[in-house]
Image: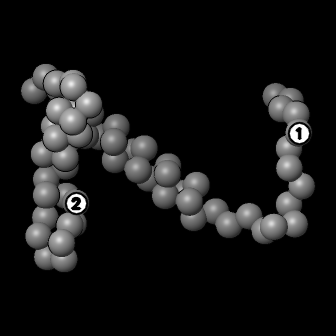
């Protein structure tokens, strides 16, 4: 569940449906659990990236080499 406005909660399903509607999409009911799970996974990844502090002294990567 998501927390908004202090103590009120909005179900993740409602957020997914509203977001899809805002961009002109619909989410089939059978796909909704997977979309909600994927959104939660991506949120955790985003939190990891945002939580990783890089000092200003880090050299930029000019070229990608796998």
Q: Position of residue 6 (x, y in %)?
A: 19, 77
Mark 1 secondary-structure assignment: loop
The span from disc 1 to disc 2 (Cα, nearest Å) is 39 Å
**Left or right, residue 21 beside residue 54:** left
The residue that label 2 is drawn on is 2
Q: Position of residue 4 (x, y in %)?
A: 20, 67
Compared with 29, 43 (above or below) is below
Sequence-first tag of 1 and 2? 2
- Depth check, mark 1 against mark 2: the one in front is 1
Which residue is pictured at 89% across the width and 55% down the height?
A: 59
**Left or right, residue 60 beside residue 45:** right
Image quadrant in which you'd find residue 58: bottom right
Mark 2 secondary-structure assignment: strand
Query: 27 or 34, which is in the foreground?
Result: 27
Q: Position of residue 13 (x, y in %)?
A: 15, 43
The residue that label 1 is drawn on is 62
> In the rendered image, which quarter contains the N terminus?
bottom left
Compared with 26, 33 (above or below) is below
> In the rendered image, which quarter contains the C terminus?
top right
């Amino acid at each position: 569940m998501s927390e908004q406005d202090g103590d009120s909660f909005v179900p993740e399903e409602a957020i997914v449906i509203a977001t899809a509607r805002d961009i002109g999409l619909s989410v089939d009911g059978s796909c909704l659990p997977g979309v909600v799970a994927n959104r939660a996974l991506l949120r955790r990844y985003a939190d990891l990236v945002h939580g990783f502090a890089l000092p200003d002294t880090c050299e930029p990567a000019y070229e990608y080499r796998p």
